[in-house]
Image (cartoon, rainbow, N blue to C red):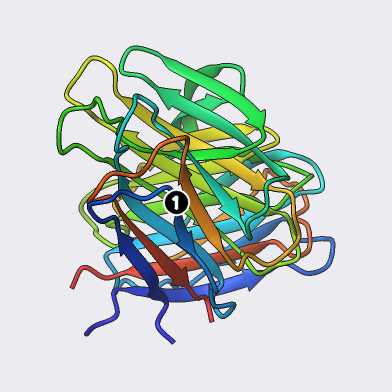
């Protein structure tokens, strides 16, 4: 079996999309990695959150981020905001560039997630996010939903799910 | 199509006495190395790296860290390890370690460590090993602390050609 395999990919069409859902994820890999490029179809929000197995509970995060002028950190629970997109008021045709990694996604441990994303914008305010995420749930991950907060992903946003095997 | 991302070796910790994991005899046939660590400890401490069994003060590092309430940055010179983020006693935390151009014999070696430890913080570390030797072994430890059973360590090789 190949070590690094594309499981699924999707590119948002002209109508936009309120969620990207990777379902029926094979339970045959060791780790999962999502690589994406995203922009909001409207509004000023950059916020994107992730859900596993459609669960709405058990998430927490710590975020380290830079704005172009300062470095900050926050931590919270609730939705798992470990990703981000370019806001719709960003420079046209500009998308975020990010990824998140989930080791041992079929284990019976709680699931640790490492995320990294940038939203460079050729403007005073741009962001770089380094995220530590946790889903306090021992279930194997069978689906991943990537959800823009209250808006749609814009056309041409793209998402790739890879399976990584150490077998 | 040639495979560009290959598993070199994986180690899973069992028992209750393991304090380090070593990958020896790493082939020089790749371009870069990626080490994925998913680990929990008996007592929290920083992940730390050594190359080629070098225990001298040939390492240094710089980091940026977010605790959830504040961001900070720091560094250290002439250390005996490259440090990464703290690992907790509560969950199996994630460290992604990239060691680029590891087999060349012309330059000192750098490592980039991304540590995701939700109970402690998110951090990014860059480390330097002042040696032009090709890296043939990587030792991962947590400054003597016991690694919990079920922790996993996998090293991959990436080929540019």
In depth, the one of A44 and B34 nearer the eye is: A44
Q: At numbered mark 1, what does the secondary structure look like: helix, strand or loop?
A: loop
Is residue B112 shown above or below B134? above
Q: Position of residue A146 (x, y in %)?
A: 47, 50
In depth, the one of B8 and A165 nearer the eye is: A165
Within the image, what quadrant is residue A122 found in?
Answer: top left
Res B40 visible? yes
Query: In which quadrant of the rendered image does the C terminus of chain A lie?
Result: bottom right
Q: Position of residue B56 (x, y in %)?
A: 50, 42
Furthest residue toward right: B16
B151 with respect to A129 (left or right): right
Report the residue at 62% width, 27% height from top.
Answer: A75
Res B52 visible? no
Report the residue at 29% width, 40% height from top.
Answer: A39
Query: In which quadrant of the rendered image does the N terminus of chain A lie?
Result: bottom left
Report the residue at 73% width, 51% height from top.
Answer: B40
Q: Which residue bears the numbered disc 1?
A: A19
Q: Position of residue A9 (x, y in %)?
A: 34, 66
Furthest residue toward front: A15
Within the image, what quadrant is residue A138 found in?
Answer: bottom right
Q: Position of residue B59 (x, y in %)?
A: 44, 38
Is residue A55 shown above or below B4? above
Residue count near mark 1 (Cα–Cα under 10 Å), binned few <14, some 14–19, many ≥20: some
Is residue A147 shown above or below A65? below
B44 with respect to B109 (left or right): right
């Amino acid at each position: 079996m190949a070590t690094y395999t594309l499981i699924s990919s999707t590119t948002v069409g002209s109508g936009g999309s309120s969620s990207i859902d990777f379902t029926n994820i094979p339970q045959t890999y060791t780790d999962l990695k999502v690589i994406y490029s995203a922009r909001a179809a409207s509004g000023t929000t950059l916020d994107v959150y992730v859900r596993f197995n459609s669960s709405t509970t058990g998430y927490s995060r710590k975020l380290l981020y830079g704005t172009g002028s300062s470095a900050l950190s926050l931590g919270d629970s609730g939705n798992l905001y470990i990703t981000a997109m370019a806001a719709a008021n960003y420079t046209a045709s500009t998308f975020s560039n990010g990824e998140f990694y989930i080791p041992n996604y079929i284990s019976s441990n709680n699931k640790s997630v490492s995320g990294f994303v940038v939203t460079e914008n050729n403007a005073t305010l741009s962001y770089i996010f380094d995220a530590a995420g946790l889903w306090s749930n021992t279930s194997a991950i069978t689906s991943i939903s990537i959800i823009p907060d209250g808006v749609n992903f814009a056309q041409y946003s793209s998402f790739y799910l890879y399976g990584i095997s150490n077998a | 199509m040639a495979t560009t991302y290959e598993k070199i070796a994986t180690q899973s910790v069992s028992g209750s006495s393991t304090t380090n994991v070593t990958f020896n005899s790493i082939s020089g046939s790749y371009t870069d190395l990626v080490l994925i660590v998913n680990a929990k400890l008996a007592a929290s401490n920083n992940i730390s790296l050594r190359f080629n069994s070098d225990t001298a003060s040939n390492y240094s590092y710089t980091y940026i860290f977010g605790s959830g309430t504040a961001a900070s940055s720091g560094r250290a010179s002439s250390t005996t390890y490259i440090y990464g983020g703290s690992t907790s006693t509560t969950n199996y935390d994630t460290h992604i370690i990239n060691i680029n151009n590891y087999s060349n014999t012309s330059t000192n070696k750098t490592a980039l460590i991304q540590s995701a430890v939700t109970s402690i913080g998110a951090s990014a570390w860059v480390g330097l090993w002042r040696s032009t030797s090709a890296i043939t072994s990587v030792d991962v430890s947590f400054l003597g602390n016991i690694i919990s059973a079920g922790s996993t360590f996998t090293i991959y090789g990436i080929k540019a050609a």
